[in-house]
Image (cartoon, rainbow, N blue to C red):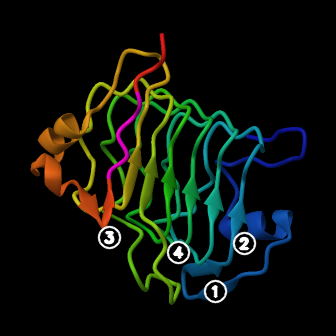
Amino acid sequence: MVEKEGFDARRTRPEELFHWLNIPYDCDGDRFFVGDLDLRDKNLSRLPNLRNVVVRGDFDCSYNRLSTLEGSPQEVGGNYDCSRNDLTSLRGAPRKVGGSFNCSDNALTSLRGLPESIGEVGIYANYRPTSRIIADTNPLASLEGLPVAFDELVCDSGDGRTHFTPDKIAEWIGAEKDRIHAGGKRVRAPSRPSR
């Protein structure tokens, strides 16, 4: 919530938010369409209800105090960035993200709740973005929730304890180690810290 500026996420309707942020939007019945939606560093403890909002570009809610993604738009055509919050779960994340999904620097122990599709062709763009999942600096204990198809996974915990080798990633997604890749790219396993 951004109280000093009069913004209350619990009570703000999408059209009020767009007006407050000076963002042009289209409306079709009860669905709203915007280009990019930048809620970065707004001191939010929760998201406004954006479930009927389709973001054709990028959605950024990083650098807040979010403990949940409830209220997120369900479709994001570009990149989705929820890094540097207080998330312990990805519950409420969009169903579809056309670009990369960045959930680094949170308190996630698994990837349950990741979008059903990341980096799909034709959500809102005529190019193929990279389906990159960035989950650095989280205390991940499991890769549960990791989709089978993605181009790159970055999941170094940053604490020197949790490291996912290609074997471990293969175990979680049910694939053979030499088949852990998509789009011709190999999954990037985290490097071991130097001692």
Q: Where is residue 145 in the image (x, y as percent from the top left)?
A: 26, 46
Quadrant assignment for the N terminus: top right
Residue at mark 4: 77
What amino acid is labelled 1 in the image?
A: Cys
Residue in front for this viewpoint, 64 or 47: 64
Q: Residue at x 22, y 58 (%)?
A: 148
3D distance between C-alphas at marks 2 and 3: 38 Å
3D distance between C-alphas at marks 2 and 1: 9 Å
Q: Residue at x 84, y 63 (%)?
A: 20
3D distance between C-alphas at marks 3 and 1: 35 Å
The residue positioned farthest toward the top in the image shown: 195
Q: Residue at x 63, y 54 (%)?
A: 48
What amino acid is labelled 4 in the image?
A: Gly
Crowding near the residue tagged with mark 3, few <14, some 14–19, many ≥20 C-alpha atoms within 10 Å: few
Is residue 109 left or right of 157 when viewed as pictured?
left
Residue at mark 2: 15
Start and end of the magenta stretch? 187-191
- Whether the residues at callouts 4 and 3 have beta carbons within 8 Å, the answer is no
Counting residues from the start of the chain, the first of labels 4 and 3 encountered is: 4
Residue at mark 1: 27
3D distance between C-alphas at marks 1 and 4: 17 Å
Q: Quick one: SS at disc 4?
A: loop
